[in-house]
Amino acid sequence: MKDQADELRKMMRKKNMRKQRVIAVASGKGGVGKTNLSINLAIALSRLNQNVLVLDADLGLANVNIILGSTPEFNLLHVVRGVKTLPQIIMNTPFGIKYIAGASGFSELANMSEQGLTRLITGLEYLNNTDIIIVDTSAGISDSVLYFILAADESLIITTPEPTAMLDAYGMIKTITSEKKNADIKLIVNRVSKKSDVNKVGNRIVSISKEYLDIDVDYIGHVFDDNTVPYSVLRQVPFYAYDNKCGASVCLDNIARKIIDPKNEKEKKPEGLGGFFGNLMNMSKKI
Ligand SMILES: Nc1ncnc2c1ncn2[C@@H]1O[C@H](COP(=O)(O)OP(=O)(O)O)[C@@H](O)[C@H]1O
Ligand SMILES: [Mg+2]
C-alpha cells in the first residue's frame, strides 16, 4: 500500500509548497486560557508582520469563534468530503488574522481517503503566504488532543500558577516527550498576579522537566491576570484588539517577539500544514 504521507510529501515538493510553522497550544488542565492566548498571540504576531492563521481544534466546544465574534458554517471536514475547498473555509477576521474552524470528528479527519487528502493538499497553495499556524486544542490528554500536539512542529504549553495546573502541565510535557523524544516544547504561565510568580512557576516546571525527563522546556514568558481579558470575552472582541496596551497584551508582545526571534530558532525545519496532516494520518494508522 502506498504510504499517504509519502504521497503527500511528493505532492508538496512538486508544488514547491511553503512550510509554515505549526504551533499547537495545549494544557493539562482546562480553562487556563489556551483559546484566549491562541487568538491574541496570533494578533500580536500579526502586528509584527507575521501572516498568522488560527486552526480551531478544540473538539468539544468550538470557542475560538465565540471570542472572534463570528461563526463559520464550514470546517476542515467539508474540505475532506469535497463539499468546500480549503480557501472557501478560511475566514478573514477584522483583526488581521485568518481562522479555520476545526472538525469535531477527529477520526474522520485522521482516516481520510487519499482523495480527501488530495483535496486538502490542493488547497494548501492558498496558504503559501502564511508564516505561522496556531492550533488551539482542548484540554487534557485524550488521544485526539495528543495527536494534534504530536503532529505539530512545536507545542506551546499553557499553565497558571495554580499547583493543579502546574502538575497537569508537567503531566502533559511528560506524555509528549514519551511519544516524541526531541519535541520542541515552549511554556507560558498565564494569569500571573504576584510579581514573585513571574519566574518562579515557569522555572520550576523547566527544572523538574530537566531533572526527571531530561528535556529542555523553553519558558517563553508569563501573562498577567488582567480584567481586560474577561471584559473583552464578554464583548466578543479579542483583548489584544480591545486594548493592546493592557497588562496581558504587553506580555503577549514580549512572547510574540521571542517566538519569531531568529536567535531562538531550532535547527529542525518545520514540516508545515501539509506535514501536520500527513503526521495526523500516520498516527491514526497506529490507533
Ligand atoms: N490572563 C488572564 N487574565 C484574566 N482572565 C483570564 C486570563 N486568561 C484567561 N482568562 C479567563 O479564563 C477563562 C478561560 O479561558 P479560555 O481561553 O477559554 O481557556 P481554555 O481555552 O484553556 O479552556 C476565560 O473566561 C478568560 O476570561
Ligand atoms: Mg479553549
Image (tube, rainbow, N blue to C red):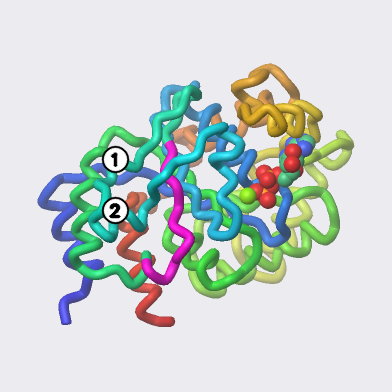
The correct choice, above or below, for 103 with respect to 69 in the image is below
Q: Residue at x 56, y 67 (%)?
A: 176
Q: Secondary structure at mark 2?
A: helix
Q: Residue at x 60, y 63 (%)?
A: 215
- Give the quarter of the image for residue 283: bottom left
Of the residues shown, which amino acid type is indicated by label 1? Gln
Of the residues shown, which amino acid type is indicated by label 2? Val
* Horizontal arrangement in the rendering, residue 177 relative to residue 114 (left or right): right
The correct choice, above or below, for 250 with respect to 191 in the image is above
Residue 96 location in percent, x, y? 45, 24
* Horizontal arrangement in the rendering, residue 105 relative to residue 217 (left or right): left
Residue 188 visible in the displayed image: no
Q: Which residue is mark 2?
A: 79
Residue range corresponding to the magenta coloring: 99-108
Q: Residue at x 56, y 74 (%)?
A: 178
Q: Quadrant of the C terminus?
A: bottom left
- Residue 260's label in the rendered image is none
Compute the Cα span from label 2 to label 1.
9 Å
Q: Which residue is mark 1?
A: 88
Total labels drawn? 2
Viewer-proximal residue among 266 and 115: 115
Estimate how packed mark 2 is, as few (under 14), some (14 to 19) or many (20 or more) residues with alpha carbons within 10 Å: many
Q: Are marks 2 and 1 in contact (CB under 8 Å)?
A: yes
